[in-house]
Amino acid sequence: MNDFVVSLMLLGALSQNGTMPFWATANSYGIMPESSGALALVRAGTSFDENHTLQWRWGLSLGVRNDRDSAAGFIPDEAFASLRWKCLRLDAGLKRTEQDFLGSDPRLGSVSSTGGRYINSGNARTMPGASINLEPLVIPFTGGRLKLRGRFGDWFTTDTRYVRGSMVHNTAAFLEGRIGERLFLTAGIDHYTIWGGTSPSEGVFPKTFLNYLRILVGASGGSDAPEGERINALGDHRGSEILRADWRAENWTLTLRHDIPYEDRSGMIFRNFPDGVNTIALSFKDKDRWVSDVAYEFHYTMNQSGTKERRPATQEEIDSGDPRIIDGELILGGADNYTNNYSFKSGWTYYGRQIANPLFFPTGTIAGTVSRRTVTFGTENNLLKAHHLGVSGKLFRKLPYRLMLTYSENYGRYLYDGVFTRAYVLPDGSYADVPLRQFSSAFSAIVRLWRLPLSIIPSIYADAGDILPRGFGATLAIVYQL
């Protein structure tokens, strides 16, 4: 039968300087208070019934939040229905992305800085839409050693953004292989495209079926598209390529993973090496250990396919007015400027939060002006080197906990002023002396009360550095789960 679960969470948030520290809000699907405030969240839903061939489930999560951006704001966090038949699953509505590298208790979240999903980390609000998912399918004649899984989905944006009403398409495909009894290899691609909508500077980006077919194959726009969309590929394309190896011993699993970001063809063919997030994680089956899960990650995004790939422009190209021509050269790639785009100026952000790597800060972060109520103009920092350590287990083999430690060196993004340069732009328009260093930490635990379905989750956070406000913060949540 379908198991039914309902939970209620009441949370208070307090910050030394008003703004909650980084790990108080990161990878929390955009629902946590951004400043001192409170949150009430009720969740209900069912699981799949494995005893039937045709299975269904649903989930609903609603909340009320009070902070500087939304006094008593209503939050539709999840509202979805899923239907599964064999290895095919249809999801429709508002549904959270699933995170990987979970710790000793799923309520504490992932020990990974990206949730194990570089390009869609769970750092921002969920979008309404639908997807068809292929769950692991054994490829015939491989003796069960090769499996294929994937996703094909479409969502629409509801936030206040530069190109209003834009859509999001996702195509993902992964091949999983087994070598022997212990070694499992995975390779795949997770690709997203923002398209359509109305731009205040370029007019309407049409949402016709023909243009939908164009964004699926990365073709340029037709005569009904603005000039920039006719010259380049239609829409704003980006994604990540994943290489992963798992050694699954009897009592533990060791994982090595490399997430490679890309914004164009040069990134897809690895001209941005060694950019990416490199993860090494160790997870024990016994979740009652003092230390059950550990993840170390090294972030590096300083290459971005180099400053630029170029060639001399032909006279015909110069006469055409192609905006990619700078100083007589046709810019073919390079200076990839991850999660930003010339036409879709809000980039890969949603309700003021970065959708991808949460260590990429939205424009306005250093000035303290980011808000989910106003337009966010992309990413102010996507050139970085960072180290992250996440640890989870159970104190005294009873109390689940999670420790997060993150240090980054931030270099801003590529800017063009005659030549491409790396720069972090300060609120007054001047350039910072890079790198800007940032350290963020968090510790959370779960304490169950009197053998009842009632728990408290105390958490403390701290930020120190040059980008986020320095100071401490704390949250206290009371959770009732039936």
Image (cartoon, grey):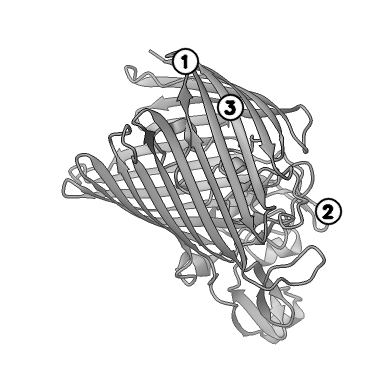
Q: Which residue is mark 1?
A: 453
Q: Residue at x 78, y 38 (%)?
A: 68
Q: Earlier in the sequence, mark 1 or mark 3?
A: 1
Where residue 67 appears, as percent x and y from the top left, is 75, 34
Viewer can see residue 265: yes
Q: Which residue is mark 2?
A: 200
In the depicted structure, whether residue 187 falls above or below residue 18: below
Q: Specify whether 316 is left or right of 390.
A: right
Element class at badge 2: loop
Q: Earlier in the sequence, mark 1 or mark 2?
A: 2
Q: Which residue is mark 3?
A: 477
Q: Amino acid at mark 1?
A: Pro
- For residue 393, which numbered disc appears in the image? none
Q: For marks 1 and 3, give the CA distance.
A: 14 Å
Q: For marks 2 and 3, give the CA distance.
A: 42 Å
Viewer can see residue 114: no
Q: Residue at x 32, y 51 (%)?
A: 255
Element class at badge 3: strand
In-front residue for pair 17/261:
17
Q: Specify whether 407 is left or right of 2.
A: right
Q: For marks 1 and 2, give the CA distance.
A: 51 Å
In-front residue for pair 93/467:
467
In the depicted structure, whether residue 289 falls above or below residue 163: above
In-front residue for pair 226/289:
289
Classify 10 Å Cα crowding around label 2: few (below 14), some (14-19), many (20 and above). few
Classify 10 Å Cα crowding around label 3: few (below 14), some (14-19), many (20 and above). many
